[in-house]
Image: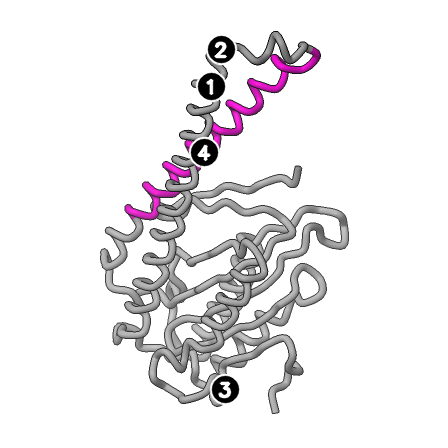
Amino acid sequence: MKPKKEHYRQKLPHFQQPGQWYSVTVSLEGAIPKGAMAKYSLKLAVAKDNYHKLLEQEISRTRDMDPITIGFPKSMILKPESKDKNFELGNSKSQLADTKAAYYTALRNYRLAYDKFLHKSTESTISLIKPINQEVIKEALRFWEAKKLHSHAWCIMSNHFHWVLTVFEKDELGEPLYLQDILHSVKQFTAKRINKIENREGQLWAHESFETTIRNNEHFANVFNYVINNPVSAGLVKSWEEWKGTWTEDMDFQRP
């Protein structure tokens, strides 16, 4: 099994595993008003905790059942109470499915609220779509290409950027790679450069980034379209191709 990396920032747990697809949103410090996301964060944390607890119970129950049944005749395994056990197992799976659905609903609501606050925010004094700032971000997003990751799309907005990428399982030395470390590198580089450009000091990026592990091809397609159409949803352009801060993997890195 691939090693997982769990870390906490603010109130939300982040679980990362090498060799994954991700969608990431990184916003400027102060872009979202303080406390605006509190209720969504709490609901998401509770839903995620409930789902992971039930998932662990299900895995534990399955693991405990296997050694008992191995090597025994069916006549000894199929006891009269097995119907009750099957009913209990079915109930458990149904509860797990409902809890999983509740978690993904909370995740979706969190993301919608997060982007809503970003689009309406007037807090930021820095514009990331200023050409010189935009180029700094693009340079950072391109830096680890083909070394640690593969970028699928990004979209740079005035106070945040979205990034869809695959993090490779291992680096050139065979060490596992984690999104957290890549984001730290990107944030550190861009903060130093943009602060210098803007003649400012202090924290540039919000501590908390919004990260989603992409589950399958359908989820990837939905996330990809959501990201590139962000400026359209914000009412800034009519077509995603018009936005200078948008890039997709079927383009050259230097946009015409």
Decide which of tag 4 and tag 1 comes sooner along the chain: 1
Q: CA distance from mark 4 to mark 2?
A: 21 Å
Depicted 190 relative to depicted 61: above or below: below
Q: CA distance from mark 4 to mark 3?
A: 47 Å
Q: Which residue is mark 4?
A: 93
Task: For mark 1, give the secondary structure.
Answer: helix
Q: Position of residue 134 (x, y in %)?
A: 49, 80
Depicted 27 relative to depicted 57: above or below: below
Residue 212 among magenta residues: no
Q: Quarter of the image for the N terminus: give it.
A: top right
Q: Amino acid at mark 1?
A: Lys
Task: For mark 3, give the secondary structure.
Answer: loop
Q: Amino acid at mark 4?
A: Lys
Q: Which residues are magenta?
A: 42-71
Q: Which residue is mark 3?
A: 244
Decide which of tag 2 and tag 3 comes sooner along the chain: 2
Q: CA distance from mark 3 to mark 1?
A: 62 Å
Decide which of tag 4 and tag 3 comes sooner along the chain: 4
Question: Is 5 left, or right, of 74 in this rendering?
Answer: left
Q: Position of residue 113 (x, y in %)?
A: 30, 63
Question: Is 70 left, or right, of 209 in this rendering?
Answer: right
- For the residues bearing labels 2 and 3, Cβ distance under 8 angstroms: no
- For the residues bearing labels 4 and 1, Cβ distance under 8 angstroms: no
- For the residues bearing labels 1 and 2, Cβ distance under 8 angstroms: yes
Q: Which residue is mark 1?
A: 83
- For the residues bearing labels 4 and 3, Cβ distance under 8 angstroms: no
Q: Which mark is residue 80?
A: 2
